[in-house]
Image (spheres, rainbow, N blue to C red):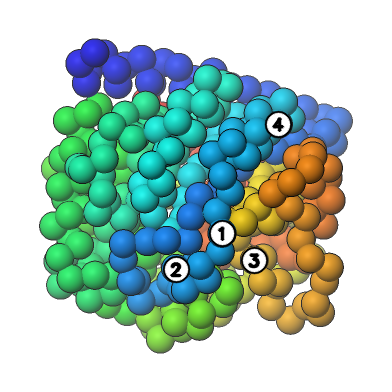
Amino acid sequence: MTAAPRSLRRKLSGWVPLVRMGLGAVRHRLTGHDAPLNVMIALTDDCTSDCGYCDIPARAHPSLSTERLRRVLDELAARGTCRVGFWGGEPLLRADLAELIAHARQLGMWVSLVSNGDLVPRHIDRIADLDHLLLSLDGAEEAHDRQRTKGSHARVLDALDAARSAGIPAWTLTVLTRHNLDDVAWLVDLAQARGHRAAFQVLHHAEALDGGRGSALHPDNSDLRAILEWLKTAKKAGRPVANSLWQLDQLLRWPDLQRPAPVRDASAPTCLGGRLFFNIDTAGEVYPCSLLIGGAEDTPPSMPPPSVATGDVAEALAAVPEPPCNRCAATAFTEYNGLLALRPEVVGGWVRGLWG
C-alpha cells in the first residue's frame, strides 16, 4: 500500500477512537463515570540520547514483557481506553514495537509515540501503522545538539523525512530551555515549510525523571513568557503551532515557570488525572500522570503505587489515589484536562490535528 492511501486510511480510522473518547468524556460529565480514556505507557528506560533535562535511562527499570503488555492493552480496551501513547526512554529500541502498535490498533485504540528520531529511518517498519509520531526537536542544530546528543539534529530531520515518505503523521515536540528560545520562530517556520505542526512544552519533569538536571536549563521567566506570547500570536495568525490557545494561556498564568511543580489551587477545576487519563511507568506502576512519579513535591511519602505488572489491570486503575494537585505547567496534562473537559478550542485543535 502506498503512503498516500495508508495516510488517508489512518486519518479516517482515527475518527472512531476520538469520537469514543468524546462520548466517554460526556458520560463522565453527566454521570461521574471514570474510565482510562487516554493512557501513556513507558515502554523502556533505555535510550540512545543523553538529554540535559532527562535522567530516565539512569533508572534502568525492568520493562514489561510483550505478553504482559498485550494483556495490559486488552484490559485497558475492556475498560474503555481510546488512545494509548507510547514513550520512554526510546520506544524504538523495543523489537516488539510493531506488534504492540498493531495490537493496540486492533483493539480500536488511536496510537501515538514519542521518539528522539535516532532509529526512525532504520526501523520505520516498526511504526508503519502508527497513528501519530512526535519527534523531539529542540531547535536549530547548535541548540538541539547542545542539550541532547551531538549529531542528533540531523537525525531528527532524517526521521521527519522518513515519516513523511511512509505516510506517518509526525509533529515536532520542543522542550523550551534557556538555550533555544531564539529558535522558536525557526521551528515554526520549519513546520510551515514541511507541512507538520510544532508543539512546545516547558521543563516539567519530576525529579525522579530528571535527577534534578533540568533546573539548570530553566529560562528566565520574562523571556519564556515573551516566547509564549509570541506562540499565541503565531497560533492566532494560523501558523502551525500545535498547542491550543487555552493551554498557552494556562502557562502564561503560571506564577513561576522556573518552578512548574503541580499545586492544589482552590480556584481550578478537579484534575482528571487518575480518572480519565493515566500513566503506566516502565515497570508497570500506575500514576495519574508522570509528574507524580516519585511522589508529589511537598507531600509526605505514600504507599507504593498500584502496578499492572501482575494481577488485574482494572483493580490497579481503581487503586490509583486521587492526585494531591489539580493544576500544573505540564503541557500534555493541561491539554488532556482541556480536551476531556470538552473545551471547544482544545477539542477543535485535536480534530484539526487528526486531519492535518
Q: Mark 1 or mark 4, which has the lower sequence index?
A: 1
Q: Residues within 10 Å of mark 3 (few under 14, many from 20)?
A: many
| Eye-nearest disc, 1 or 3 | 1
Return the x and y of residue 100 as percentages of the image width and height. Answer: 49, 34
Looking at the rendered structure, the secondary structure element under dot 4 is helix
Q: Secondary structure at mark 3?
A: loop
| Distance (Cα) linking label 1 and label 4 | 21 Å
Q: Is residue 329 left or right of residue 220?
A: right
Q: CA distance from mark 1 to mark 3?
A: 16 Å
Viewer-proximal residue among 87 and 204: 87
Q: Secondary structure at mark 2?
A: helix
- Contact, CB < 8 Å: mark 1 with mark 3? no
**Lower sequence index among marks 1 and 3:** 1
Q: Quadrant of the C terminus?
A: top left
Say if 106 sits above or below 173 in the image: above
Tell which of 301 and 100 is nearer to you. 100
Q: Residue at x 35, y 76 (%)?
A: 52
Give the labeled residue for mark 3. Answer: 293
Numbered disc 1: secondary structure: loop
Numbered circle sitting on residue 75 = 4
The residue that label 1 is drawn on is 62
Q: Earlier in the sequence, mark 1 or mark 2?
A: 2
